[in-house]
Image: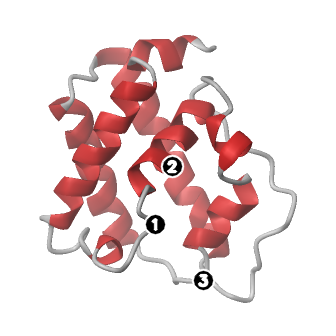
Amino acid sequence: MSDLYARVGGLDVLLAVCERWHALCLQHPVAAHPFERAMHPHHDLRLAAYLAEALGGPALYTAGYGTESDVQRIHACNGEHVELDEACLELFDQALIDTGVAGDAAAGISAYFRSATEAQRAYADPSHPVPDDLPFRHA
């Protein structure tokens, strides 16, 4: 396991961050949009598993939920939405603060979440399909 996964505090902390982020997004006039539709009933746990793996923890996402290509397809073909992305990123940072993730750990996960969010823009247009064999994005 990587130092970043351990510094963040492991899966339980990541799940708390994801749950707090989801709640903050639902309260925000711009960030609420993707969260107002029917979502997977375990969205927060799936995101926490993805982040755990991305930060160097156990391979929970790829062992039980899917691949990087699957993650990209979930978010693909919705056009570019920079204002939405920025609102969600700001709220993710607030969720880190609210759950007690601070210092280098917060900076590391925030930077990773930003880069992962920006990487999704590559598949915003349906004319750019998601390849089948994308490597998993690690921090």
What is the distance, in whole Å, between disc 1 and disc 2 at their CAs? 9 Å
Asked if the residue at tag 2 contacts the one at tag 1, i.e. Cβ–Cβ closer than 8 Å, the answer is yes
Query: Which residue occupies 23% across, 40% down?
Result: 95
| Residue underneath mark 1 | 40
Give SS at disc 2. helix
What is the distance, in whole Å, between disc 3 and disc 1 at their CAs? 18 Å
Q: Quadrant of residue 23?
A: bottom left
Q: Earlier in the sequence, mark 3 or mark 2?
A: 2
Give SS at disc 3. loop
How many residues crowd mark 1 within 10 Å: few (<14), some (14–19), many (20+)?
A: few
Query: Residue 46 got which mark?
Result: 2
Instruction: Please give left or right for residue 125 compared with residue 34 in the image.
Output: right
Above/below status of 86 relative to 90: below
Give SS at disc 1. loop
The amino acid at mark 3 is Cys
Question: Is residue 139 something that shows in the picture?
Answer: no
Give the percent coordinates (x, y) of residue 105: 39, 20
The amino acid at mark 1 is His
Instruction: Please give left or right for residue 45 compared with residue 2 in the image.
Output: left
Q: Earlier in the sequence, mark 3 or mark 1?
A: 1
How many residues crowd mark 2 within 10 Å: few (<14), some (14–19), many (20+)?
A: some
Give the percent coordinates (x, y) of residue 96: 26, 33
Give the percent coordinates (x, y) of residue 49: 54, 39
Above/below status of 103 relative to 109: above
| Residue underneath mark 3 | 77
